[in-house]
Amino acid sequence: MINHPIPIRALLEHLDGTPFPISSSDGLRYALRRNAAVQSFAESIRSGAVEESDIRSLVNWILADFRAGARLKYALELAALAVALEGWHTLYSDEYINELAELRLSELEPGPSVARAVRKARSGDAQQSEKSIRFTLLPGGVKRSSHFASLSDAVSIYASA
Amino acid sequence: MPALGHTQMMFGHLPLLKPAARSIRVDTHTGNAVENDIALAVDDRGRRLYEAVRQKHPGWKNRRKAAGVYNCFGLAFASRRTSIREDVEVEKIRTDDGYRKLKMHERPAPGDLVVYKTPTGALIHVALVTRLERLIPGAEPTATMALSKWNDHFGEDEHEVHDHPFGEQEPTFEFWTDRPLHT
């Protein structure tokens, strides 16, 4: 753990002593989102204090403990990482969340199931922001969004208005 | 944070390590399959955290030490055989198996479920109502006791429904039953 950047060490140390007695992946996502250490770590990602290479190193370090048939020591941290990356839309955050969500490995739980909850929430956010753009892009105070089948429809109509 | 621009898979090598994903067949009453996985044995970290939580709840009566295999949904819906993790699976069970939310005037009964939710409506936990306790002899029952398996690596405890470890999540709770209305 000693070679990790400070924000990663802080996250690991905090989670190691914090119980999450929650069975549901949506409920656990909710709890992790409200956790101060996870919020601080997400801010470290946004500010650049933690970089993609740090995340990849962390994942490699966590997975180095993988043993078939045994609970991964830092499986909760995989879930926390997915939650911290939820609002960060990059190729590698997509890769992390999608790859973890696709796994059906008991060793990694609750990582994969929380990643699926994160992926579902991101999908909902994307649909919500698309709806929002449909409204905000429209000239002339047009309120109905049902004219547009997609974001690109809305943009093209706006451009031609 | 700039992307590195390569596509090295973070988890791609794991299937080569012969992981131990195991599930059993769980169907709803109407035959819809319920996704599940059998949780692995509890480790030292799980035992330590469970004991830390238990120390904050002296009123809990322990039924089972920290253990793997099942979580709260597995206790309530799959006879302690496996873990069910996703809200959508629980919703499938609730609908197909005919659970309904108790009305305000209805009293819970042993065998009903107490369901804890976040303020946003996500499930946190489900517990099995075990008994109604009279704190004053002869008076109406004032405490509802329930049995919980807190997650897939904690133990089982009987507790009063308000005596739960979810304080930070500011949960609400409601009762579900499979009993018909007006019985």
Image (tube, rainbow, N blue to C red):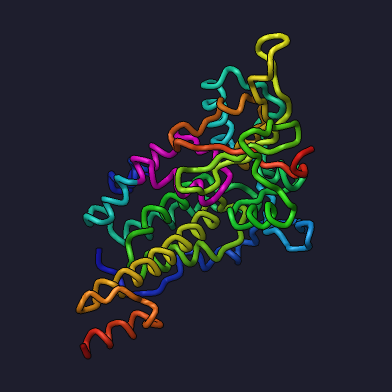
Which of the two residues, B107 or B56, is positioned nearer the viewer here?
Answer: B107
Q: Position of residue B165 (x, y in %)?
A: 52, 30
Reply above or below: A134 against B180. below
User: Does the magenta portion include B87?
Assistant: no
State which quadrant residue B64 falls in. Answer: top right
Q: Which residues are magenta?
A: A12-38
Residue B153 visible to an observer of this rendering: no
- The residue at 34%/43% (across/down) is A9
B125 sits left or right of A39 in the view: right
B1 sits left or right of B119 in the view: left
Residue B34 visible to an observer of this rendering: yes
Position of the C terminus of chain B by quadrant: top right
- The residue at 48%/62% (across/down) is A120
State which quadrant residue A113 falls in. Answer: bottom right
- The residue at 37%/67% (across/down) is A92
B90 sits left or right of A113 in the view: right
Which of the two residues, B152 or A141, is positioned nearer the viewer here?
Answer: A141
Reply above or below: A4 against B111. below
B54 sits left or right of A91 in the view: right
- The residue at 69%/32% (across/down) is B108
Q: Position of residue A138 (x, y in %)?
A: 24, 77
Q: Position of residue A110 (x, y in %)?
A: 54, 50
Q: Position of residue A20 (x, y in %)?
A: 50, 38
Judged by its main secondary structure, the magenta piece is: helix
Which of the two residues, B120 or A49, is positioned nearer the viewer here?
Answer: B120
Q: Residue pushed farthest top?
A: B137
Which of the two residues, B81 or A138, is positioned nearer the viewer here?
Answer: A138
User: Does the magenta portion include A28?
Assistant: yes
Reply above or below: A2 against A47. above
Position of the N terminus of chain B by quadrant: bottom left
